[in-house]
Image (tube, rainbow, N blue to C red):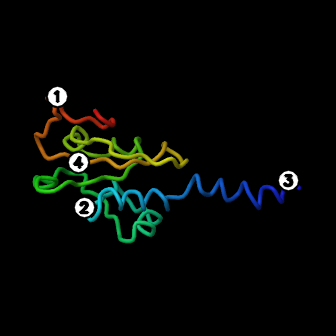
Amino acid sequence: AGVALWNSTLRSEFARTRTLKQFAAEIHRQIGNAPLYIVAGEKPGLSYYYGRAVPAIDRRVRPGLATSQPVYIFARKRELSELAPEYRKRLRMVMQAHTLGGGGPPAVYMLAPPGMESASGRKWSSQPNG
């Protein structure tokens, strides 16, 4: 009986808490065709569900990045330390997944243009409404 319960109900619920399928669709709805990057490596599951390749951002600062249009970065909080400090100080979380996994739930951050400040005069933070 326990095996049947696991196979029929709990296994699918467990899988749903680990997949990026719904989050990738939500990302696409919110940012449209704006550039989306990952911090490093590859995330084939994200690319598959997103519908196109999601490249790694160059860890060095690229002067023209995010000057004419918003740029978004998909990352888990622990991955942000791999970004150049110039990028990290310009990040603002715009959405977070409700999935499980190592390093905490993934999130999407908007990379603000250089020198952009929030309405309060503070630099953007990586926290929502920061």
> Residue 103, image x and y in percent?
48, 43
Give the mark nearest the N terminus, 3 or 2.
3
Q: Which mark is residue 111?
A: 4
Q: Give me the C-alpha separation between circle 3 and circle 1.
A: 55 Å
Q: Give me the C-alpha separation between circle 1 and circle 4.
A: 18 Å
| Kind of residue at badge 1 | Ser
| Kind of residue at badge 3 | Gly
Residue position for label 3: 2
Give the mark nearest the N terminus, 1 or 4.
4
Q: Residue at x 47, y 64 (%)?
A: 45
| Kind of residue at badge 4 | Leu
Q: Is label 3 or label 1 in front? A: 1
| Kind of residue at badge 2 | Ala
Q: Which mark is residue 44?
A: none
Q: Which mark is residue 120?
A: 1
Residue position for label 2: 34
Give the mark nearest the N terminus, 1 or 2.
2
